[in-house]
Amino acid sequence: MKKIIIPLFFLSLFAACTPSNEYKIQVTVTDGPDSIMVHNHWYVTSDTMPVIDGICEFTGVVDSFPTLVSLGFPFPSHETTRMILEPGKIKVNYSKDKGFTLGGTENNIILQELFDQLKPLNDEVRVVWRAWNDAYKKEPRIKEECEEAWVIQEKVKKRKDELTRKLISENPNYAGLVITLPIARYENAENLGSYVELFKEYAGDKRYESLVTQYEVAERTVSGKAAPGFSYPNPEREMVSLSDFKGKWVLLDFWYVDCPWCRKLTPHLINIYDDWSKNRDFEIISVSVDKPKDYDRWLEAIDHDGATWTQVNDSTKTYPLEYGITGYPTLILVDPEGNGVRKIVGYQEEGGLRRILEEYL
């Protein structure tokens, strides 16, 4: 048989046609909730593949990497996992008991190790959060029981956040950036600044740039610098400005009529306001983002809920953007000199909110 010799030039050409940035996601499924798997490459594509005999595979070429994507089942189960897309063979296993586990490529191996270290506390957070939620839903609602459950979840969440920060500091890699994202919106400017520095090699990545934006907003608004001013109408259509309250501690309360947890926070604000408004130079300013069509409903909600403090309406949602607010309720504490000092995201039980505010007042 005549020996075939392929010139080196053609071997090089063949190698050049095989992209070095090619990825393959090999998925193995045991007792999955669906026979379809969705690979969501955010900002780029979303692919769907059938799971046949417990196997599913996605292939492609990634232009910039590493980058965060998700993989999982569609609704109604919507069980998903975060995953890092990068060249190579990425291995994903799913079982009903263990959920998703990642491996195969360097960053996914590290990410799974971080997930494993956080899992016990994540599981504990879910348990104590469910216990608080069950207490809250009881009829009649027993305030003391809710407060006790809230204290327990506060302690567990604090331990989880401390472990997360430790793991972040030990992992200046893309997997470390991934576990930073869920806690970033709750962090102060100092912590956000440290994350920006730690992961600066990923400049240009959309998640990193989001982190930079959050840091810049926090540094500008709640790090002891002058809080952004405003001038908005109150229910009597008189213009009210933040500067009108210089010399007082001001709690800015961002909300809207159809936000259930905003309305559930109001009774706690009433109690705190009644206690502190006269002897602590303390004021609350609720900033509604309700649109003009809901103006009458806004007035009715104020009256119905018994909120007696200063109320203003920002129907354009301009002012929340100054603070990078993406969810409601959100509270901003401003000191008597007009400097923003703390951002509080989400619903709080009254005792929890008092504890936060008493760190400053």
Image: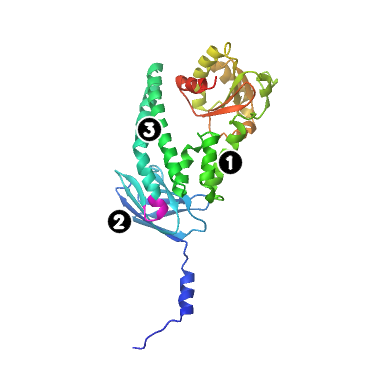
Q: Is residue 137 visible?
A: no
Q: Position of residue 192 (x, y in %)?
A: 53, 38
Binning the other alpha carbons within 10 Å of mark 1 as few (below 14), some (14 to 19) or many (20 upward) gives some
Chain part drawn in magenta: 103-109
- Dot in front, 2 or 1: 1
Tell me the CA gap for discs 2 and 1.
45 Å
Quadrant position of the C terminus in the picture: top right
What residue lies at 40% left-to-right and 54% top-to-bottom?
106
Q: Quadrant of residue 335?
A: top right
In the rendered structure, which disc, 3 or 1, sits on the residue that comes first in sequence?
Answer: 3
Separation (CA) of disc 3 from disc 2: 35 Å
In the image, residue 155 above or below residue 236: below
Residue topped by disc 3:
125
Secondary element type, mark 1? helix
Q: Could you tell me residue 97's position as x and y percent?
A: 29, 43
Mark number displayed over residue 53: 2
* Dot 1 amino acid type: Thr
Camera-nearest residue between 71 and 271: 271
**Element at label 3:** helix
Point out residue 279 in the picture as x, y percentages from the top left corner: 57, 11
- Which of 174 and 311 lies nearest the eye of the viewer? 174
Residue under pointer 1? 213
The disc labelled 2 sits on which kind of residue? Asp
Which element type, helix, strand or loop, lies under badge 2? loop
Q: Is residue 145 magenta?
A: no
Q: How much space separates mark 3 and mark 1, taking CA atoms?
A: 28 Å
